[in-house]
Image: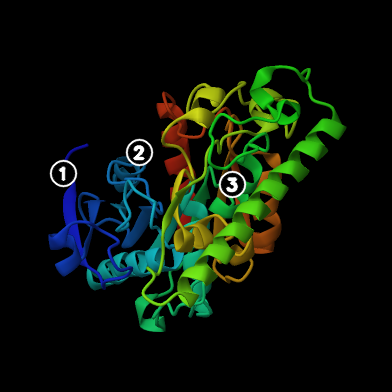
Amino acid sequence: MSDLELVVIDVQPGVTMESQSGLQALRPRIFGALKRPKGQGTGVAAIVMHPTSNFMGHYLLEPLAERGIACMGLNSRYAGNDTMLLMETVLQDLGAGVKWLRTQGYRKVVLIGNSGGAALSSFYQSQAELLTATHFVDGLPTHLSAADLPPVDGLMLSAAHPGRSRLLAEWLDPSVIDEADPLATDPAFDLYAMKEPVPFSADFVAQFRAAQLARRDRIEAWVWARLRMLRATPGAPSDQTFLVYRTHSDPRFLDTTLDANDRPVGSIWGDARTVNYAANAMGRFNTLRSWLSQWSSGSQADGPACLARTSVPVLLMTHTADGSTFPSTAALWREAGGNRLTEVPVKGGNHYLAGQPDLIRQSADAMEAWLQKV
């Protein structure tokens, strides 16, 4: 990807010790990669951002620039490590990117919410329109202000996950019977033991889903109890780290008749069982505060709920062969967006459009056409 411009933006400090880098702590910065169109362009700029993934090499940067739309892949301060990630603090980083683009003279700024960036973008715009996240889920003040969060002109959601809290609730392995032992297993809910025939029965799926929520609620109760204990103990630290084992178990990975689309069997990250037991996986490393912000039932960053509180136009790009977003996912976004939402199917599109350059161009074409009407 040629002619990318490195963008360096100063941001306000957030969580104590959110970085072990003394330099970063003294001068906190976020980094982006901007692809400007040749010539005059359309005067429109887009930001594609994820809470933790590095999007500086995102596949949409160049195609959108070729269509006259400046596109910046922006990283949050938590890029590559969500152990201490607070969704409310990420809003400050995204807002800094929006403000920077405004200073560059772009007449219109939109957000591309790709994958986990969809809930982030929706959360951001909901708070830009009406700031309610004055406190983190654990009760401490966020110190966010309206000046931190200039509103954008539209949201483009692509292969859109509904939010980290919903993902964890649907991916937690309910067969874990000891949170301190990654191998302790209840065979009745061991999805990968191949004891339950595929397609799964409706009763099995219902029991599996109930057991997932029960495990989530047990973890959540422990987190709150531990946090209260720390805060009630003089001299105790304000937070602590902990592990959540086996976070990649969803019947839809093995049974494609559930929430059916064009996806193949398995995970978007490879063999689903291997991902489930991996040393590093989604939601594996946490602090009490970051778990409440990202993964808990009380998270303020639920994508569809946040989208419903916005007023801007919305484009939803539905990847029909995605193994991590499903017809039910699109229905949530559709209901939240109402008549503001335009949906475009990306037929045969996998989650990352990996190996699908024609579909990348098709997506960029659809975004360009939609932006001309916004």
Q: What residue type is disc 3 on? A: Leu
Gap in angstroms between the C-alphas marked 2 and 1: 14 Å
Q: Secondary structure at mark 2?
A: loop
Q: What residue type is disc 2 on? A: Tyr
Which image quadrant is residue 22 in?
bottom left
Label 1 Cα crowd, 10 Å radius (few <14 / some 14-19 / many 20+): few
* Left/right of residue 47 with respect to residue 176 in the rendered view: left
Q: Which residue is mark 2?
A: 59
Q: What residue type is disc 1 on? A: Asp
Q: Which residue is mark 3?
A: 168
Residue nearer the viewer, 224 or 90: 224
Q: Secondary structure at mark 1?
A: loop
Q: Secondary structure at mark 3?
A: helix
Gap in angstroms between the C-alphas marked 1 and 3: 38 Å
Residue 132, x across and y down, in percent: 53, 79
Q: Which residue is mark 1?
A: 3
Residue drawn 50% across the image and 62% down it:
293
Residue drawn 63% across the image and 60% down it:
221
Q: How many marks?
A: 3
